[in-house]
Amino acid sequence: MRKSLLTCLFIFGCLSLFAQLEDDEFFWGFRAGATYSSIQDVSTTIIPPVFPEHSYTTETSPRPGFVGGLFFYYRFRNSRCAIQPEVTYSQEGSDFNYTDINGLEYTIAFKYQYLNFATLFKAYPVGGLHVAIGPQLGFNFENTNMDYTSNMPELGPDLQITQSLREVLKGETNLSVVLGVGYDFNFGLTVEGRYNLGAKDVIETLANGFNFIENKNKTTVYQLVLGWLIPFDQ
């Protein structure tokens, strides 16, 4: 066991010394992985303030999803810095869970889908190890994709309530700041973890009879992705 651990550490040390993409070259690539996202303050939007807080409980559960897309990469000559524009598709949202003292339980699942445009600036402190930061604009092309399910359909058919919710809660374009850390191997593989911090409201609340209110519902998104870098001359 100790010998295997030492071998792994030796290999990683070698990669740290030599795993570095050549500068002043253009690359393109693809990336794919998993997302884990949530939407903040849904309870404030959904629950009217007239209800006593002791009469109900709420919970917002993050949703897993998929992210994938294409990117371009350029490392500046004689520099530890690079730039990476990219276009990606991502699944993001939240599950809002409600329970009250009358036994009503329901879940509103926000299942949004985005087409994202980002430009990341990457810095390499050593070898292929990098940190990244940049803005991202996400266009929500499934802005009414939500489902309502409850344990008391006699209060209103779930499908009917779902349709009503889709008419008053509309997904919005998202603007976020992307923070990442990862490793680029010299044979083309790149591994990266990201944290996307939402900067604007992603749910527009229209006039409605549910007593929903307009609120700042920002997103937080975690990503773990694998990518592959390909030189343009190949």
Image (tube, rainbow, N blue to C red):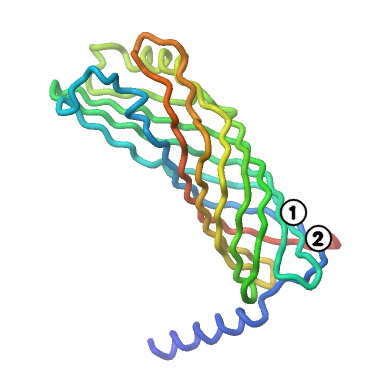
Return the mark for residue 139.
Answer: none
Q: Give the left or right position of residue 8, taking residue 45 as reference.
A: right
Q: Which residue is mark 1?
A: 72
Q: Is residue 61 above or below residue 25?
A: above
Position of the C terminus by quadrant: bottom right
The tag earlier along the polypeptide, 1 or 2, is 2
Q: Is residue 148 above or below residue 211?
A: below
Q: Which residue is mark 2?
A: 26
Q: Give the left or right position of residue 188, taking residue 224 as reference.
A: right
Q: Distance between the Cα atoms at labels 1 and 2? A: 7 Å
Residue found at x 76% / y 64%: 75
- Mark 1: which secondary structure? strand
Residue found at x 82% / y 66%: 24
Q: Quadrant of residue 50?
A: top left
Residue found at x 43% / y 91%: 3
Residue 124 coordinates in the image, percent (x, y)? 64, 69
The amino acid type found where label 2 is placed reads Phe
Of 175 and 102, nearer the camera is 175
Of 219 and 222, nearer the camera is 219
Residue 200 coordinates in the image, percent (x, y)? 52, 34
Give the class, few, some or many, for how many residues have Cα within 10 Å of label 1's Cα (few <14, many ≥20): some
The amino acid type found where label 1 is placed reads Phe
Marks 1 and 2 close (CB-CB < 8 Å): yes
Residue 83 coordinates in the image, percent (x, y)? 72, 57
- Mark 2: which secondary structure? strand
Position of the N terminus by quadrant: bottom left
Residue found at x 61% / y 32%: 139
